[in-house]
């Protein structure tokens, strides 16, 4: 009898059986009891040499990240890596440019490294359907929704980007701002940017205001330098601007520097609100007002869902984490 035979008869995955045999704490009592009943029934004994070999060849969990400058992703990945290692899995991290095809990369990783599961941070929806059917391991979209794709091996944990962005713009509108600009990613390649822009549009529509993307919206990759350059372009085409919503805190940080380099003050001349709630915003001058994503919950739930799917203890799960307005000093009444 082999571990695969025990898995088949017990109804649990090979990974779960392996953890039971290795006395791991990361197994439910129900699973442990069922597996051990099969082990005792057939008087199975684990080969110590095979056990050692299994640890050496185990590939573990892959994490694919789009955008090396995304500080929110960095914080989430750090937490996920710690959780993955605590649960006795190896961890492989891959950084991609924002325009790279993350699904093609995942297919390649599956062929070459055979991971037990994949966590995606940042995706382009147009890349999913042409490639995802080639991926046969459990996957989780982290910060992006996956329910609409309908794949049995795909879950997600995210913020409601549309609602959060709408809340940010409505906050500026409630303070009397009308000439509001938006800084965000390319909506053609970023699901987050597309959803957040939709939220902005709805905020303006709700207040009976028109939104002109040619004038009020400026593309920026999720980085400080990119935010700086985009803010300069936005001021040039919208000199009457009194407030800006940046779709990431790193964009907002660059925007604040650009505003000051124009001889203007934040928030006296232009208010700035960010998105993500990264720690560095608390140490900005002025302290950044932002929409905070619950990154701790996103990280922990993503790993937990993936491991349960790997063990066959769960099917696809779609979780939405809350967001919060964090008041700072970069926004004021107009």
Image (tube, helix red, strand yellow):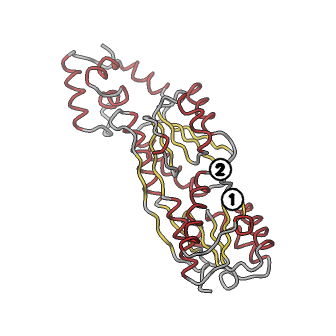
Residue 238, picture quadrant: bottom right
Q: Residue 247: horizontal and vertical position, in percent?
A: 61, 63
Residue 322, placed above or below residue 100: below
Q: Residue 179: horizontal and vertical position, in percent?
A: 67, 78
Residue 113, placed above or below residue 260: above
Label 1 residue SS: loop
Q: Which circle marks residue 87 in the picture?
A: none
Residue 109, placed above or below residue 73: above
Q: Residue 102: horizontal and vertical position, in percent?
A: 62, 39
* Residue that label 2 marks: 67
For the N terminus, which image quadrant?
top left
Please tell me which residue lies in front, 268 or 86: 268
Label 2 residue SS: loop
Q: Residue at x 72, y 60 (%)?
A: 219
Please tell me which residue lies in front, 132 or 329: 132
* Residue that label 1 marks: 223
Dot 2 or dot 1: first in sequence order is 2
Q: What is the crowding at mark 1: few (fewer than 14 residues within 10 Å), some, or many (at least 20)?
A: many
Q: Residue 86: horizontal and vertical position, in percent?
A: 41, 43
Circles 2 and 1: CB distance less than 8 Å?
yes
For the C terminus, which image quadrant?
bottom right
Q: CA distance from mark 2 to mark 1?
A: 9 Å
């Amino acid at each position: 009898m082999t571990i695969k035979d025990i898995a088949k008869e017990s109804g649990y995955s090979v990974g779960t059986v392996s953890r039971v045999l290795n006395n791991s704490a990361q197994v439910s009592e129900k699973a442990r009891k069922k597996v051990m009943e099969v082990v005792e029934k057939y008087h199975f004994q684990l080969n110590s040499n095979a056990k050692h070999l299994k640890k050496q060849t185990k590939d573990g969990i892959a994490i694919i990240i789009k955008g090396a400058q995304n500080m929110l992703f960095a914080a989430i990945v750090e937490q996920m890596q710690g959780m993955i290692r605590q649960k006795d899995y190896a961890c492989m991290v891959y950084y991609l440019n924002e325009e790279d095809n993350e699904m093609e990369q995942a297919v390649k990783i599956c062929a070459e490294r055979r991971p037990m599961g994949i966590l995606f941070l940042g995706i382009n929806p147009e890349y999913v359907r042409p490639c995802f059917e080639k991926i046969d391991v459990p996957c989780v979209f982290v910060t992006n929704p996956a329910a609409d794709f309908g794949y049995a091996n795909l879950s997600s944990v995210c913020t409601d980007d549309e609602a959060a962005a709408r809340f940010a713009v409505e906050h500026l509108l409630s303070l009397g701002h009308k000439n509001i600009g938006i800084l965000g990613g390319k909506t053609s390649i970023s699901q987050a940017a597309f959803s957040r822009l939709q939220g902005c549009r709805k905020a303006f529509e709700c207040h009976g205001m028109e939104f002109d993307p040619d004038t009020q919206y400026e593309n920026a990759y999720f980085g400080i330098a990119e935010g700086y350059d985009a803010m300069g372009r936005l001021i040039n085409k919208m000199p009457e601007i009194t407030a800006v919503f940046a779709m990431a805190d790193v964009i907002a940080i660059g925007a604040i520097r650009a505003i000051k380099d124009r001889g203007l003050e934040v928030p006296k001349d232009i208010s700035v609100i960010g998105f993500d709630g990264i720690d560095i915003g608390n140490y900005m001058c002025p302290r950044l007002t932002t929409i905070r994503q619950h990154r701790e919950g996103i990280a922990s739930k993503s790993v937990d869902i993936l491991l349960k799917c790997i063990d066959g203890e769960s099917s696809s799960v779609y979780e939405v984490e809350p967001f919060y307005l964090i008041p700072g000093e970069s926004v004021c009444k107009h």
